[in-house]
Image (cartoon, rainbow, N blue to C red):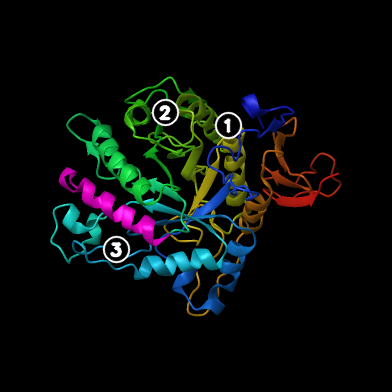
Amino acid sequence: MNRGRIAGAVAVLLAAVLTGCSPSSGNAAPVPVVGVTHTQDSADDYPAAQVAAATTTLARHPMVQNQYLMGWGADNPEPAPGVFDWSSLDQRMDLIGQTRGIPVLTLAGAPDWMKGGSPGTTDWSRLNTAPTRAHYRDFAALAAAAAARYPQVRYFQVWSELKGLYDEAANRWDYEGYTELYNAVYDAVKKVRPDALVGGPYVVLDTWSAAGTPAPSALSGPWGVVDQRALDVIDYWNTHKHGADFLVVDGSSGTRDAGLTTDVFRATAMFDTVSTWLRARVGLPVWWSEFYPTQPGGPAWSPESPAAAALTVAAVAQALRGGADRMLLWQPQASADLPSAALWTTPTASTNAEPLPLAVPWTWLAANVNTRTTISYSPAGTILEITAEREVLTINLTADELIPPNQSAPLSAYGIRITPRH
């Protein structure tokens, strides 16, 4: 199996991890590198007995837990001007608190009256519509009200994937409009919460095959070419923002036009290359608020598959090699509409939530990745090892049973094992 530039013995000290936006007061522990984004259904939507395994997974070691201001599990927080309903967001924040999470709030989802709708109504089909420019300050005021209501939340992401902000006529993102919205929110949140850490622009870093890209950039690799229009968003925002504490992006290791352009695991090097570029370009901690390691063609690897878990951990390892600070798993509860790895199964009328293959390595990453962690590959690139202070997480990146270096027992196809560090 050829791993290109990652083949051979590689050991990378993660000296850049957990810098910049980690708590620095007193002897506070560093914020975990990995976390989750709760969506429509999560562990707070079922009887406690049904989701005991889910809450145990979340609470095993504190991890970052992100929730949206509106939508994705939260109702309209301000259905009419000055009329607030925080009940569903309170419920989700209670879940995060009860499971020892480090809360993050994504300030996205605008009430209908901020985007041309009638006060007192909520048309969920328009959730991805941005507020009109005339209501940017109204949305900023709502964001500030949320920041004041939840003092336990220190991290705030502004908007999501520039939803509703694409300029069709110019065939590019309306980065001027987004940055105006971002600055209004940044100023409003910082005014009521000077301790808050605010990040953007939460742009999707689309990639294309070399032959199919409509907007080529110099940022490329065997995995594809990053769309220059997304990089333009980052550059404009970085130049015109009032301030920022971290940079937020999302992306996939597969291209939009051709899917995977290299081996499924080799393609995860995209997260390394792009993270390295972003740190150098912007000089802020890099958050992958969403990341999607693309699966091979054919039947999808289900969340129950160890292959999906191995691929997810491999993507995290690559991002950490590039100096990324946070990796948030979209939707920790498995769902039929998202076959990628998750942490637990969806409860049904007759079944409880059960841990999935990613649950143990994900909580291990939350507990163990720090500045002394190293990442290495076997000479053939078939075994990945993440070495912490006391333990080693070993992943088989192949469909064959293999014996990892310095171990005597074989590791099953796409298997993941935790062993003491020698």
Residue at numbered disc 2: 226
Q: Which secondary structure, mark 1?
A: loop
Q: CA distance from mark 2 to mark 3?
A: 36 Å
User: In the image, what residue occupies the spot 63% across and 48% down?
Assistant: 26
- Report the predominant secondary structure element of the magenta stretch: helix
Q: Front-most of 256 and 43?
A: 43
Residue at numbered disc 3: 77
Badge 1 density bin: few <14, some 14–19, many ≥20, Cα 10 Å: many
Residue 2: x, y in percent? 65, 29
Amino acid type of the residue that numbered disc 3 sits on in the rendered structure: Pro
Badge 3 density bin: few <14, some 14–19, many ≥20, Cα 10 Å: many
Q: Front-most of 301 and 313?
A: 313
Residue 44: x, y in percent? 47, 70
Residue 361: x, y in percent? 66, 53
Residue 336: x, y in percent? 44, 61
413 sits to left or right of 390: left
Q: CA distance from mark 1 to mark 2?
A: 16 Å
Q: Earlier in the sequence, mark 2 or mark 3?
A: 3
Q: Classify 168 as above or below 193.
A: above
Which range of residues does the magenta coloring cover? 128-150
Amino acid type of the residue that numbered disc 1 sits on in the rendered structure: Gly
Tell me the tag on residue 322.
1
> Residue 268 occupies which quadrant of the picture?
top right
Q: Earlier in the sequence, mark 1 or mark 2?
A: 2
Instruction: Name the front one of labels 1 and 2.
Output: 1
Badge 2 density bin: few <14, some 14–19, many ≥20, Cα 10 Å: many
